[in-house]
Image: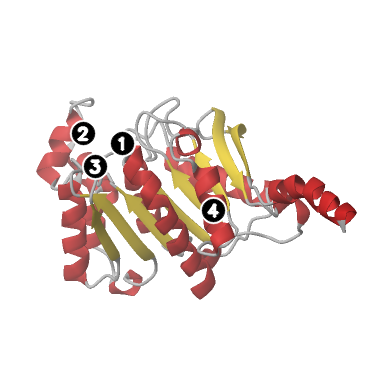
Amino acid sequence: MKKLLVLIALLFPFVTFAQTGKVFDNLSLPSKILKSDRKFAIYLPPDYETSNRTYPVLYLLHGSGDDQTGWVTFGEVLNITDKAIADGTATPMIIVMPDGNTGRRGYFNDIKGDWNYEDFFFQELIPFIEKKYRAKTDKRSRAVAGLSMGGGGTFMYALHHPELFSSACPLSAAVGPFTLDEARITYRRNNPNLADSTIANYYNRHSVLALVNNMPDSQKKAVRWYIDDGDDDFLYEGNALVHIAMRKKEIPHEFRIRDGGHTWTYWRASLPKVLEFVSDAFHQF
């Protein structure tokens, strides 16, 4: 019996280690669209190296001022996701965290058409991930989430491509200009010679409110939405307006206001619910 207990004690650290996922935060892929190598971080679930299964994928977007390491370093994605999987509140998944802060900041195609990050995301990043890793490739198994600037990216990507995502979770999101007049001021700040028609087209494509208000009835239930914002967040107005617009359009969504501001403390507390929410989508659809 004593020998058996010693053997178990010796094996215990390896058993514990086997239950830990892995994060790689300095990976890259070449982009023809952006004419540069693009960095990304990735979380692989605990059983990735010991199984042959394929996994659903969550694309997790950082905010302004961070890069692909933001969710790793400050968001504690490894520990939080490992715990959610171990507790059974989240299904094992791959989490991809791209860098949206090198070259230019943001996840959209530029209004002048000379920096097309969204094209890179859909035409190069997603195909790269689905070829290199054992990722499921159907709509049910793909989700997007992000904070602040990345919350805006989450809205854009799911609204532009509802056929590709089962769920979307914008956190403390920057939702873009509320009105076309506001868009004229915003976009001309750095590009004073933009034509009105160019601004109008870009606004209709990149304002969450405009996209929600113009959403066809056939798309209302295409994506499961979880929108989360702190009661002290400076971006509260835009998120509240999107919630109201979705209610008026009868677009199903979860809208949560919790105690907190525009901080990593808030977003770390958001991540377990995001993982649970997207896992429900991975299971349901």
Q: Identify residue type, mark 4.
A: Lys
Labels 4 and 1 touching (C-beta < 8 A): no
**Marking on residue 261:** 3
Task: Residue at 34% x, 33% y: name it.
Answer: 64
Task: Residue at 37% x, 30% y: name it.
Answer: 105
Give the Cα separation between the discs numbered 2 and 3: 27 Å
Mark 2, residue position: 187
Which numbered disc flags the more N-terminal residue, 3 or 1?
1
User: Residue 23, how many percent across, how many down?
Assistant: 61, 40
Q: Identify residue type, mark 2.
A: Tyr
Mark 4, residue position: 83
User: Residue 208, how many percent across, how many down?
Assistant: 25, 52
Circle 3 SS class: loop
Give the Cα separation between the discs numbered 1 and 2: 8 Å
Mark 2 residue crowding within 10 angstroms, few (<14) / some (14–19) / many (20+): some
Q: Is residue 208 visible?
A: yes
Which numbered disc flags the more N-terminal residue, 2 or 4?
4
Q: Quadrant of the N terminus?
A: bottom right
Quadrant assignment, res 184: top left
Q: Nearer the viewer, mark 3 or mark 4?
A: 4
Mark 1 residue crowding within 10 angstroms, few (<14) / some (14–19) / many (20+): some
Mark 4 residue crowding within 10 angstroms, few (<14) / some (14–19) / many (20+): some
